[in-house]
Image: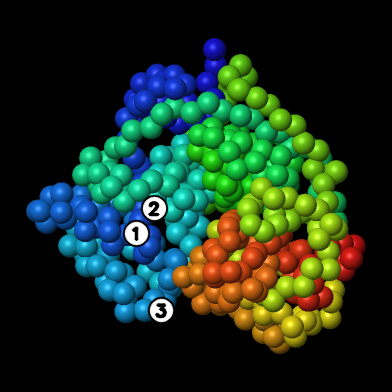
Amino acid sequence: MGKTMIMKIMERAAHKEVHVGERVWCDIDWSTARDFGGANCTLQFDEITEKQGRVWDSDKIAFTFDLQAPSHSEKVSNNQKIIREFAKRQGIKHVFDINHGIGQHVLLENGLVKPGDVILGTDSHMNLLGGVAAFATGVGNTDIAASWLSGTNWFRVPETMKIEATGEFQCGVSMRDFLTRLVGDLGAGGLDFLAVEFAGDAIERSTLAERITLCSMVTEMSGKIGLILPNGPVLEWLAGRAGPEVRSRVASIAPDADAPYIETRKYDVSKLEPLASCPDAPDNVKTVREIAGTPVDQVHIGSCSNGRFEDIAAAFAVLEKSGFKVSPSVRTIITPATNEVMRRCASEGLIEKFLDAGIVFTNPTCALCTAEHYGALPGGDVGCSTTNRNFIGKVGKGSHTYLLSPMTAMATAVKGVITDPRDIIC
């Protein structure tokens, strides 16, 4: 019997053959913590070691400040200070402070992520790094603190589902819509602790931004990791950042022809239309046509799911077709994923046009993924967002959120009601 991608990744990290269902100890390539939760990790580590312990490898630990950046309260500022002081004391150089952006994206852009890596983080959406075939997973503070001591963590080897996507997206339809279709089909528990391998010509042609989008919401289906084997321009981008070693890594973790899958699902993306996750759950999926005309109070484009340049550019194309005007009844906010993305938006002239249209363009952060950031919704308001969760109260008590693609979100901002982007750009 052959091996799946996750089995090969875990065998590399465990230094032995592994089997589905087995619990194994794996070496960690990176153990990361963000500003939210990071302070508790450092305090736990100091408590365990009575402030006398040293981390196992200061070059394999990273801190990312992305949820509340810059800080909006004295409490948050103090927590960030705790992290900075711990990093200095331990000689940890990889501290991506408030001017960098969303942690996973920043790690990617800085060439710190390679296919086959095992990465821990305090973010439940660490698994978006599966877009370059890294096994990244969110864990609790105690797991992070323990990994800083040993450089290891234990995992159960998951079963794998294969999802094949073929065809080409039609005008106004994007990878986010395909992802929404998957969440609607599989449901909140449909990938319970499963690994997923995404394959097919639609995946092989996809950009890095699209792969990040696709893997970012595996969590919302209770999956462990979604994995896409880097190829083409994505592989070249990765090799340029992380080094030529990534090419041999890709070859070593490619799934075998007889790899065991518990199920294979096939989709033709050319048959998709714009979709929405309706309040108050990501798997409450309807077509945009079904809910078109619903009034909204706020639109947010960004997050780890859809904050890359390509996502913002897709929204820009809709705005351009609309004469660079958004509805005065809607508060529209755009948040780039990283400083690098923001700089590209600036150099290509997008930011000025957004500002002219009355849109708020913010610094790079996780932003309105939670109510812990500027722009939280008041009770009774309806928001539309490209984030990955829309549980009731997630961005404000008593508010409700529709999850949309960047194109649908901007079309909605333009019209003031939920709008199918095809009515504008097709």
Q: Quadrant of the N terminus?
A: top right
Name the residue carrying label 3.
72
User: Can you identify the residue that label 2 sits on?
Assistant: 122
Q: Secondary structure at mark 3?
A: loop
Q: Is residue 198 above or below residue 423?
A: above
**Residue 217 image offset from top left, x and y in percent:** 59, 48
Q: Locate residue 90, reporting x and y percent.
A: 19, 58
Residue 203 seen anywhere in this rendered image of the structure: no
Corner quadrant of residue 198: top right
Is the C-beta separation of discs 3 and 2 under 8 Å?
A: no
Reading the image, the residue beneath label 1 is 37
Quadrant in the rendering for residue 376:
bottom right
Residue 137: x and y, percent?
44, 44
Of residue 111 and residue 417, the one placed in the foreground of this image is 417
Q: How many marks?
A: 3
Label 2: few (<14), some (14–19) or many (≥20) C-alpha neighbours in 10 Å: many
- In the drawing, does residue 49 fall left or right of residue 65? left
Are the two marked residues, 2 and 1, in contact with CB atoms closer than 8 angstroms? yes
Nearest to N terminus: mark 1 or mark 3: 1
Q: Is residue 387 left or right of residue 99?
A: right
Disc 2 and disc 1: Cα gap in Å? 7 Å
